[in-house]
Image (spheres, grey):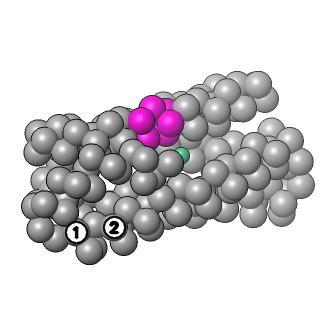
Amino acid sequence: MNPEINTLLMKQANHERYAATCYTAMAYWCEDQEYMGFAEFFHTQAKEEIEHSEKFFAHLVDRCVMPVLEATPAPRCDYKKLKELADMALELEMANSKGIHSCYAAAIALKDFASMPLLLEFINEQVEEEAWANKMVALLSRSDCAGALYSLDRHIVKEMA
Ligand SMILES: [Fe+2]
Ligand SMILES: [Fe+2]
């Protein structure tokens, strides 16, 4: 396996793990603030990001590359309001997309055909991921009072589906 592709896929796998940690921290912030709908949604996102990271690591193992799990940076915990979580989620998803696009660009340049199906699957996945994050930002931008936030929290899982 080309070492450049190997490094990029490893980096992406670790970034997905970092995203998982960030979503877990967001879920606990929501639980602490009694936004139980958002908490459920972010716990689910955390699990999905772990699955994504495992898919990248599995691909590396299949191609005889030993996965290196790096220390993930501490996630942000000091949110002031729900909207900041949505902004952070969008930032994370955009970073994920960027990393995946870099992997795909390298795969094309280096003719690494074996990684392309996996990367295309994730390129597609990221369109949906950015879509829910954008929608969440929009919904929270117009929900400023406690009543609107309470109502949104009750429906957020369905809204994001
Ligand atoms: Fe992901
Ligand atoms: Fe994601």
Label 2 CA crowd tier, 10 Å (few <14, some 14–19, many 20+): some
Q: Residue at x 48, y 58 (%)?
A: 132
Task: Name which residue lies at 68% across and 56% down.
Answer: 123
Q: Position of residue 142 (x, y in %)?
A: 26, 74
Whether residue 69 is situated above or below residue 106 in the rendered picture: above
Task: Give left or right: position of 82 versus 103.
Answer: left
Q: Is residue 9 above or below residue 132?
A: above
The answer to whether residue 87 is seen in the rendering is no
Label 1 Cα crowd, 10 Å radius (few <14 / some 14-19 / many 20+): some
Mark 2 lies on a secondary structure that is helix
Q: Which amino acid, by three-letter code, is at mark 1?
A: Ser
Give the image location of residue 10, x and y in percent.
59, 41
- Residue 137 position in % (x across, y down): 35, 67
Q: Residue at x 67, y 27 (%)?
A: 58
In the image, is residue 83 part of the stretch drawn in magenta?
A: no
Report the span colored magenta.
44-50
Q: Is residue 79 left or right of residue 62?
A: left
The image quadrant of residue 21 is top left
For this view, does 41 lie left or right of residue 126? left
Identify the amino acid type marked 2: Leu
At mark 1, the secondary structure is loop
**Disc 1 within 8 angstroms of ligand 2 (CB):** no
- Residue at x-position 33% and y-position 67%: 139
Above-or-below relation of 75 to 130: above
Q: Is residue 97 left or right of residue 36?
A: right
Membership of 49 in magenta stretch: yes
Report the residue marked by disc 1: 143
Instruction: Find disc 2 in the rendering and name its residue.
Output: 139
